[in-house]
Amino acid sequence: MREKDLLLLRNKLEQIKKMGWVKNKRHGNAGGVGNTLEDLLEVAENNLEIPDFGEWELKCQRANTKSLLTLLHFEPEPREARIVPQILLPNYGWPHKGAGIKYSENERSFRQTINAIGYSDRGFGVKVDHVMKRIYITFDFGSIDGRHSQWRSVIKNTIGTSDINPKPYWSFTEIEKKLNSKLNNLMYIRAETKTVDGEEFFKYNKLEAYVDPTINKFIDLVEAGDIFVDFDARTGHNHGTKFRIRSVKAGELYHEHIIV
């Protein structure tokens, strides 16, 4: 099925490539490059733990972007603790920049894009425990940057200077299941862009295909600082926790690269 789906996808992408410049159908949407391609492929948007096109997951970015590539939407364990809305946001969150303007005066934010190379300016980091076979989030009070002195005082006087309890984590086993169910076959597509009279246009002509990711490669990329954990929550809405990767490193997650 993988080869059959790849052939079908290849033929459809070849047809799209021949269309040349295609207008962004989701104007103002950062994800418009992927949404427009899905529309052209007649693929319905989904947040399911299944690939987008047959057995292939589609990932699309602008060719000149420096943004990270989202791999997986994945809330941390222990699930029953509801870590993000019940622990991180109320205990470690800070006033949202839109509080009292766009949102209520009590709106809080917890937005962090962190990796295993050191700590963020708010003291959060990613660690790998090979004994317990987990990736987990840690908090180091001493690593909070001086720019956040007021927030640091609040943390010290409310929950204290200790590490997060319980620690948010993802088991190697669950990560591997996600890789195999969602990302086992990846088509990575980069689009050239141009703007005409305020309208953005795409040209889809750079395709790469990868198959068979491995948990060992995933862990290696985490420890190298190339895979990040991205939190994006506010009081009114949790946009979801994600594993994201430097796009130039995406191929290193996989066992095989297929020339398309």
Image: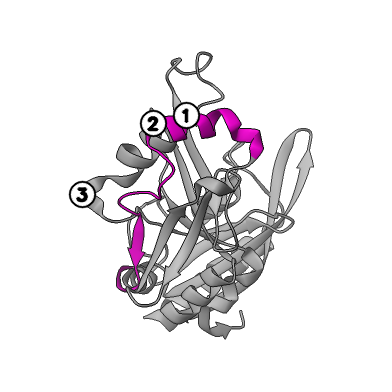
Q: Quadrant of residue 32?
A: top right
Please indicate whether residue 158 sits to the left or right of residue 61 in the image: left
What residue is shown with label 3?
A: 80
> Between 118 and 112, which is closer to the camera in this rendering?
118
Secondary structure category for the residue under label 2: helix
What residue is shown with label 2?
A: 158
Q: Real-space Cα distance between discs 2 and 1?
A: 6 Å
What residue is shown with label 1?
A: 154
The residue located at (72%, 37%) in the rendering is 199
Q: Which residues are magenta?
A: 146-174
- In the rendered structure, does residue 148 fall within the stretch colored magenta? yes
> Between 7 and 78, which is closer to the camera in this rendering?
78
> Between 68 and 125, which is closer to the camera in this rendering?
125
Q: Quadrant of residue 64?
A: bottom right
The residue located at (61%, 36%) in the rendering is 27
Above or below 41: residue 209: below
Amino acid under disc 1? Val
Amino acid under disc 2? Thr
- Name the colouring of the figure: one colour
The residue located at (42%, 19%) in the rendering is 106
Amino acid under disc 3? Glu
Of the image marks 1 and 3, the number of the one nearer the N terminus: 3
Check whether the beta carbons of the residues at disc 1 and disc 3 lie within 8 A of each other. Answer: no
Check whether the beta carbons of the residues at disc 2 and disc 1 lie within 8 A of each other. Answer: yes
